[in-house]
Amino acid sequence: MEKFTTIQSTVVPLPIEDVDTDQIIPARFLKATTKSGFGKSLFCDWRYNEDGTPKADFVMNNPLYSGKILVAGRNFGCGSSREHAAWAIDDAGFKVVVSSFFADIFRGNALNNGILPVQVSDAFLKSIFDAVAANAKQELNVDLVNQVISITGTDLKESFVINEYKKTCLINGYDDIDYVLSIKDKIEQYEKTSKYLDLLKA
Amino acid sequence: MGTTLFEKVWNAHVVTEVKDGPSILYIDKQLIHEVTSPQAFAGIEKRGIGVFRPERTLATPDHNVPTKGQNLPIVEDLSRFQVDKLTDNCNKFGVTLYGLGHASQGVVHVVGPETGTTLPGMTIVCGDSHTSTHGAFGSIAFGIGTSEVEQVLATQCLMQTKAKTLKIEINGKLAKGVTAKDVILYVIAQISAAGGTGYFVEYCGSAITALSMEARMTICNMSIEMGARGGMIAPDETTFNYIKGREFAPKGAKWDEAVAYWKTLYTDADAVFDKTLKYDAADIGPMITYGTNPGMGISVNKNIPTIDSIEESNKVTFNKALDYMGFHAGDSLIGKQVNWVFLGSCTNGRIEDLRQFAEFVKGKQKAANINALIVPGSKQVEKQAIAEGIDKVLAEAGFELREPGCSACLAMNEDKVPKGEYCVSTSNRNFEGRQGPGARTLLVSPLTAAAIAVSGKIVDVREMLN
Ligand code: SF4
């Protein structure tokens, strides 16, 4: 996984609430058996007409907006557990998703793929949308080390919360599996001593 | 201070804890299917390791499979490839597979309970958010992403941060025509599609304990639709009676020992939840959704909310949803024409659901405008339905029983609802395009689905019950 410390970038604003993973990547694209190539289908049904031409009113088709930061309304990533949603966001070039609320499974999937979900207050989210509406080239600065997100060129900023362990993983580019594999002796010990596992043996 | 059911099961599975971080939980059973596992198998191969405890994983293809002609090769190339890939991976890594044609194949969350794979007190995961279904047995069961599937294949453990606990207590008696599906749609409408985020739910109260195991599964299944990681119900005699004698249930002396342990799995009287909600069963009517998330539901005889009753920040989403659905704020849904009905899925594809639907349509006729997809949740459900003559009752009423799979719940196979058409569905998600691009889904119970299937339009099932 790539290491993550600070990102400064323009943003793609998506002021819609309850964006579910079926919208992020519709089920019909889940037939791939690898992790790559999902970016072109990100938000497919909002982004393209049936004939495949871009819908002019969708933000990703507006040349004014681009960047590594996706900013979306409350409860982003609800619904299905498909990690394809995180792969699609990553493949489309986003490193950070900002929202005032994230669905649990999506948050975990994002972190496992080196994407930082930054949860901000409703008021700060509104400030971001307002700033970007006023200036499409407005940048945000996301500083993972100090856990601060700021609207550059203004004094608007907010600190955000992240699990210490996950923060260490992102900064160093580690993944959970390496860690759990390193404590296999403890797992085997658990298996030997668990009364319930013993009970379940036929 | 006492502990909750969730904490009891959780504590029994902690292998170790990361300092200032998550716990490492031992996973008793992982269920896998064709869509979210190939990248996980590829991951362990890339690491040069095998599946750590292959006997603790069970596989079955469900999401992509056709619901007709399962004896023939899958026509759609990508679906066939994905299902074949699952078979290859299971063979290569020694994982048990209930493949197409196997007597126990079906939707993962239907297969687990009916084979006795799902037992109280277990930790169960699957790369599918409706894994919460298995919580009906008093197990900690939740959906995970593919990286986590890989983690469990590699280590039989999962790094997890402990969720907060939410108690949802429902007391009283359900009115005639009101079922478990209505209960859960009602609760989600009350607390919204995000209201349970960060929590693990325990359902309790007299309205819950009165339910059958299958009805309890319907409730726990949809916990994820309020954002919760999972939902559980304390095991009781109903649970034990359901499990006894099933293929993988403990037998003989082990059974008695197991039941003795399972009886300790309840929330202590002095345990404290992070949050508690209480509802009265008498307030619940037959529910239907009008929007594009499961929280947008109303009692079928009520009107869609008016715009001024919607929170300011939610107005854009509300209007967008109504626009997609072709409905207007403040309208009633009664009498609106519907051309599609889907009975099935891990929410309502079990034998009791088929029985309820068949009993209602018996002696009546499918409305001429209705296209129905009646899909059993598993091979065992299909077999049972045929044994009970449900297939015949359905056929006489103009319906056809298909073969098991996820089908129109997520429309990855051929079972799709056409653009712009309304479909009353017993599944769990009414997201835009969920049942096919442009399809408009209205979530209902199997009983309401039956009433609409014979009426051709939206009706209050209570008016059709004598
Ligand atoms: S029936 Fe629907 S919700 Fe259930 S596992 Fe299949 S796709 Fe998921």
Image: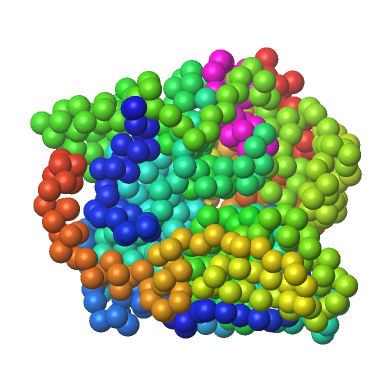
Inspect the magenta stretch and tell me whether residue B186 lies in it. yes
Inspect the magenta stretch and tell me whether residue B91 lies in it. no
Q: In the picture shown, does residue B275 fall above or below A16?
A: above
Magenta residues, start to end: B170-189
Picture residue at 35% right of the left edge, 49% below the top: B124
Give the image location of residue B67, x and y in percent: 52, 57
Left or right of A130 on screen, residue B138:
left
Q: Quadrant of residue A138?
A: bottom right
As drawn, the residue found furthest toward the front would be A155
Q: Is residue B171 visible?
A: yes
Picture residue at 80% right of the left edge, 29% below the top: B302
Q: Nearer the viewer, residue B457 or A130?
A: A130
Give the image location of residue B16, x and y in percent: 25, 55
Q: In the picture shown, does residue B318 fall above or below A173?
A: above
Looking at the rendered image, the quarter that the N terminus of chain B falls into is top left
| Colour convention of the picture | rainbow
Q: Is residue A49 visible?
A: no
Left or right of B76 on screen, residue A49:
right
